[in-house]
Image: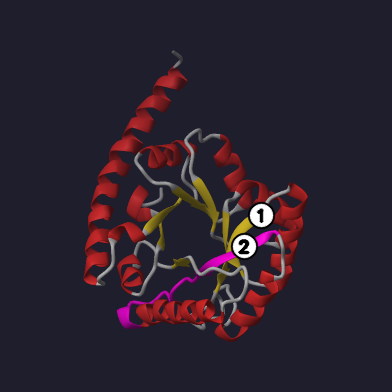
Amino acid sequence: MSVCDVVYIIKFSNFMDQILHNWRRLEERIARAAELADRVPAEVEVVAITKTRSAAAVEAAIRAGLRHVGENKVQEAEAKKAGVDAAARWHFVGHLQTNKAGRAVTLFDLVQSVDSARLATALDRRAAGAGRCLDILIQVNTSGVAQQHGISSEELMPLAEEIAALSHLRLRGLMTIAEDCEKASQVRSCFSRLRQLGERLAATRIEGVEVRYLSMGMSADFELAIAEGANLVRLGTAIFGPRD
């Protein structure tokens, strides 16, 4: 066994210990938040956000029991996924440029951040070329903050109808990022708006559209998101600890 192998084993063991400890605490917090909202804890799934984390850390997270991995850069995901042996469902959660649609289609099981008909069309075309159907979420800007990506509430239904007409995309729900604010009421209102939009979208019964997922909530606010109906929460530092 080489020195490099020994170093990797030690680092992997350290990752496992930290992640298992954090994950046990998170499961308790998720269960408590779900129960307070009269929900079943098993309804809430965690996407481990692995931005800047090593492949070894991702491998450790999957082996600790996490089944979903989220990346926000295509290039980083390409390098990292090649170094991960354990099986997981890979999510793209960042802003996706249309010129990277083809690479995204080959890498990810779910693209959470579709925010235009142009991007949806590019993904559909690339998915057709790859002979697959791609699950997607529409990202909605529920905060009204101009710097945040996502469509407005008014644009949701027209975009959903356009996506429904694309044969290689499956619209499976909505995603949002709450306002970066210390007021819990303002943060929660972003999540409440997405829940209401999800209910409206489901009520339209557009053929081929299923509101299976509401992806909202990150390490600092996921309990508020669970209270408003989130069933995908995107957690990074809560799992892996602070970034170096």
Q: Position of residue 155 (x, y in %)?
A: 62, 83
The reply to whether discs 1 and 2 touch (Cβ–Cβ < 8 Å) is yes
Q: Is residue 202 magenta?
A: no
* Quadrant assignment for the N terminus: top left
Q: Residues within 10 Å of mark 2 (few under 14, many from 20)?
A: many
Residue 241 shows in this picture? no
Residue 205 appears left or right of 26: right
Around disc 1, counting alpha carbons within 10 Å, would you say few (fewer than 14), some (14 to 19), or many (20 or more)?
Answer: some
Dot 1: what SS? loop
Amino acid residing under circle 1: Cys
Residue receiving disc 1: 133
Q: Nearer the viewer, residue 149 or 227?
A: 227
Q: Which residue is mark 2?
A: 170
In magenta stretch: residue 169: yes
Q: Residue at x 39, y 80 (%)?
A: 192
Corner quadrant of residue 38: bottom left
| Residue 167 x/y as whole percent | 71, 62
First-in-chain label (1 vs 2): 1
Q: Which mark is residue 181?
A: none
x 29%, y 60%: residue:
41
Residue at 38 percent of width and 25 percent of height: 9
| Magenta stretch, residue numbers | 168-185
Query: Which image quadrant is residue 169 in?
Result: bottom right
